[in-house]
Every structure is written in structure tokens, then in C-alpha cells.
Amino acid sequence: MRLSRMIYRITAIAWLLSGTMAIAAQTISTSSKKAMDFYSKARNSISLNEAIEFAQKAIAEDKTFTEAYWFLAARFNEQNRQDQQIATLKDAVLNTTYKIDETQYRLAKAYYEAGEYELSLITLAAISEDYSLQKRTTLSHKNDIALKIKNEPVPFNPKNLESINTPYDDYWPSLSLDGKVFSTTVLIADKSKPNLEWNEDIYWSFQDENGQWKKSESIGHPTNTEENEGSQCFSVDGKYMFFVACDKPDTRGGCDIYYCIHDGSRWSLPINPGEPLNSRYWETNPCLSADGKELFFSSNRPGGKGKKDIWECVVTKMSDGTLRFSNPINLSDSINTPEDEFSPFFHQDGSTLYFASNGHDGLGGFDIFYSKRNSDYVWSKPKNIGYPINTHKDEYGFIVSSNGGKAYFASDILQGQGKDIYEIDLYKAAQPSPMNYFAGIVYERIYKTPIETEIEIADLTTGNTHKFVSDWNGAFYTYLPANQEYALNVHKKGFLFYSGHIVPNKMPENKVIIEMDSICIGASLTLNNISFETDSYKLLPKSKPELEYVYRFLTLQPEVSIEIVGHTDNIGTHEHNIKLSENRAKEVSNYLIAKGIKAERITCIGMGETQPIAENDTEEGRAKNRRTELKIKSLKWK
């Protein structure tokens, strides 16, 4: 889960394997027995600080000891002490001649990793042509790419989220899909332990009534333990939390993906879903899609394109609330490289993926990239999100708000303050398609009993539909493309279906309460998404979803006969309005009969302007009066 932790483990093993036998197998540039003794001790030391101390002593004994300079520079690099790394290699260039081209290449690489791209190119130019052309060309190309990105900066206005950040390192930000819960991973010190041990826990913050973030607090037990937990994300309904935990008794590998279920009052014990999601390798950075059907994550399991890759699996919710996961699929060559890709964030638009990589063209370390998935599930070539969002350092844990306007990430922008969470205004080209969070509750009207049922939302412009179900509490949650109009339909056997017209970003808190009526004679509803051309009975194309809902209702309830009632505003003569409203009702009837509904089940009537439901002195009121109603005329069971 912690990248630095994994690197440290690998480095420690490498040191143990590079003992005196490895030294004996190579030509060493020093003839000083004392320098050689210190160098051997440095290579066999597991402690970084101790290794640095012995390497410095080796150099003090022999200023021309090339390998000691290389070793010392590498240890400084592991401690992120880039200034000392560069200074050490510059001293080596001045004081040594043995393998001078290799030393200069290492210095050029150190300059590149420190973001000093011009100095890196100058140093490369001093290397003789006898040195590896491939290495020189590759590093030169990386510098050219980095300079191009850096010389075309993108808008950047970081704001420290002070109430969310703690005195410790804060990273892996996660925003609930309704935008009201912000969670982070926090690296905290356990002061009760004598050696001040560090531990990763999940924290969260809630918005107050003014839209401000409250002070971040630990999510508590049973999720947080004495082990490491973090890199969390939540389902759209807030009932599932995914996170990564390491070194637990039931982990398959070093770190596994777990999930918890919220019962309305607290989280369940963590559930390890086992294989095929988890393996004996490293799984991290889970990200659940907004529809809850896809889980993206990073793993170094076999079968990938490189070291760590981004994978995806299909998620199925079982009847008892637990989840099942398909065999993971590698996300393709477009996303993954022979190097490392991790920290995926799949936006609510169902298309845009943000992730971290050191394998695509970037500025040095891990950079943030984004890619779009088309309708054929093909990913576009990833784009670097740009400087100064990306730097020569490692950037990861990048998330974007549902409307696409804000992004959040962890950074140590303020030197000496450790990692904090920052908010930026994301520039237009890197934004996903804007989405609106939309939620509702379905009740039976009289007794207010919640209803589990199917909900369908149709885009009135494109005809695209979104289908999902309400839960046992009658609640449903989804995301919809912003700035569109939708037909909302709820249907259940034995009930009169619900017809709603919604524009989510114009609704209070983007929520709706739906009250369903049982089918009975006289029950009625307004068909809110039936539209006609002005002063005409010709149906507009956007009426089709609603007409199909009526057809489905009549198909599922063969005992029902209906009356279609047309209404107009008060513009025009009474005779004209009566005729217009009657023709509009007949046009709806004709559509249903053409679909196969028996004509004797439908009657039509035009009421003109005689039954207004709003004042006719405003366009808004007149629009409400121009309506088509459906009434239950009779019920005949066979």
C-alpha cells in the first residue's frame, strides 16, 4: 500500500544479496585496503544511515574510489536527498577517471530525476560516443519530453484543505459520490509504542450545513486496526467501502483488497473476498465504478504488461449483500507499460480514467495521466495531465469531482510540512464529462411503505437509458450526465407507474421523493414527458420513452383499461383548444394501438383549457396546463 514501504523491502533484499562475494567478482577502482573494508561494510549494512556513513569513510580514505561514490549517491537517492546525490556524483566527476562516462551518465540521470533537465542534457553532451548510445538517446529523449511538458504549463491554483489534513502525512484522497464525505489515508505515529511505530489508518470528514468540511477523524474499529489500512473508496450508495490492508492473518499476499458493508449504523468486519480478486501478490488502490459493476485496482500479479499494472474485474452483488468478483482482466497496452501503473480513479462519467505511471512520457517520477474509454471499451492514448500538477517528484492519488471542475491530490508542495491534501480547479481539457448525483426514495403513497422496484431514466435527447433498482428502504442512487433533461419512470406490478420529468442540476439537492399509487379505478397521473409540436398534435421524438412506458404498463397489467385526457392552456378559442386536446389524446392512443394494445382498452377525451392546474398568465403556468393525463377507467380480471 505504501509505495516507499515496498521499495524499502526490495532495497533491503538487494543489499543482502550484494555482499562481499559480489564485490570480489568485479574490478574495483581502489587499492586502499582500508577504503575497501569500509566499502564492504557499507554494502553489507541494512541500515541506510549506517551504509551512508561507511561509504563516506571509504571515500575519505580514497578520493578516487568511483564505486564508493556510486554507492553513496544511490543511498542518498533512496532517502530522497537529491541535492546530496548530485553533489556526490559531481565530486566523483571531479576526482575520478575510472569509468568516467558511467559516472557522468549517473549524474545526468540524477539531474533528470531532480527536474534539472537542461543540466542533464549538458552533462549527457560531455559523455564520449563510446558510451551506450541507447542509454544516452533514451535519457536525452526523456529530457526533451519533460522540457516540452514543463514549458507548456497548465493552470494550477492549489488550496490546502486544512480541516481535512492532520499533523501527519495525509494521502490517498477519496470523495463519496454525493460529494459530502471526504476520506483519506493517514500515516500516524503510535506514541504508546517505545519505538514510535507508524501505522496507516482511514480517516474521514463530513460536510456541515454550510458546505464546509469538518475536522477529519478516524473511521474507527473494526475497519482500522493496529495494522495498515488505507487507499479507500466508497460505493455510490455509501454502503460499501473498499480498502487495502497489509499483513493481516487472512491476507493472500503482502497486501489485499478488503470491503466492509454498512448496515445503516456501523461498518461490518472487513471481508477478504479472496481469489480471484486477491492473489499471493500485491493488490492495491481499489476504485469502484459509479454503477458498482466494475472494480479497478493495481497489482504486480503475473500476466501483466510490466511491474505493477491496472486491472479490472466485474462485480456482482449477491442476495445476502456480499460481493463476487470475476477473473481480473489487464486493462490493455494503451494504459499499462513495462514499468509501473497504479492509483486508478474511474470517474462517474463511465469513461475517464486517471492513474499514475512512470512508464508513459512524463517529468521524471510518477506522473498523473488520463485516458478515455469509448463505447467499444477501447482506451485512448493516455495524456500527461501537465506541469505543475505533475513535477519531477511522484504524483499519485488523484481524484476528480463529479462535475469535473475540481481535483484533489496529495502533495508536499509546502516543504517540510509532509504530505497534505490539496484542491485545484481542473482545467477544461483534462476534465471528464460533467455528471450530476441523483437520488430518490420510492414509497407507497398511503402507508409510506418503501418499495423495492426497478427505476428507469431516459435521456430525452439521446434516448439512452439508465436502469437500476431501489433497495429495501426504497432508496436509489445514480449519476446522470449534466445539463440534460430526463424522463423518470418507476413501475411495479399492481401499482400505477410514476412519470417524472427531471433536470438534476436544477433540483434541490438532486433528490426526489416518489409516491406510488395502487391501481384502482379513477387513479390518474400526468404523463410529464409527452410533448407535441407547438399548436399541433404531432408528437415530438422525445415523447417516445414515455409512450413506451405506457405501453409496458398496459402490457404488464392486461386487466387495465385507460382514458387518455388532453389539456391545453388558454391561448386560442375554446373550440380550437377542445379539438387540439382531443387530437393529442388520440395521437397517444394511436401510438399504443399500433404497438398492439387493443383499441377497446383506450378511450380519449379533450378538455381544452377547462381544467387548469396553474395560472395561465405566465409561460411556466401555461406549460403546466398543456398536459396529457392517464386515468384508470376500468379493471377487468379474467
Image (spheres, rainbow, N blue to C red):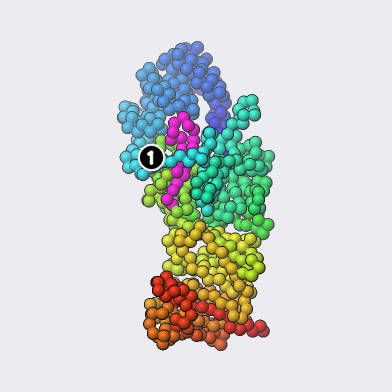
The quarter of the image holding the C terminus is bottom right
Q: Residue at x 51, y 17 (%)?
A: 54
Q: Is residue 450 above or below residue 578?
A: above
Q: Residues within 10 Å of mark 1 (few under 14, many from 20)?
A: some
Q: How many marks?
A: 1
Q: Residue at x 50, y 21 (%)?
A: 52
Residue ID for mark 1: 388
Residue range corresponding to the magenta coloring: 404-423
Q: Position of residue 43 (x, y in %)?
A: 53, 22
Specify whether residue 410 is painted magenta. Answer: yes
Q: Is residue 55 above or below residue 303?
A: above
Q: Position of residue 549 (x, y in %)?
A: 53, 74
Q: Position of residue 497 (x, y in %)?
A: 57, 73
Q: Position of residue 368 (x, y in %)?
A: 44, 43
Q: Is residue 365 above or below residue 275?
A: above
Q: Residue at x 37, y 51 (%)?
A: 429
Q: Residue at x 56, y 24 (%)?
A: 46
Please, what is the three-letter code of the amino acid marked with disc 1?
Answer: Pro
**Left or right of residue 592: residue 360:** left
Residue toward you, 479 or 314 = 479
**Element class at badge 1:** loop
**Left or right of residue 427: residue 442:** right
Picture quadrant where residue 204 is located: top right
Residue toward you, 609 or 150 = 609
The quarter of the image holding the N terminus is top right
Residue toward you, 507 or 152 = 507
Specify whether residue 363 is painted magenta. Answer: no
Residue 450 visible, this orientation: yes
Picture quadrant where residue 444 is located: bottom right
Residue 308 visible, this orientation: no
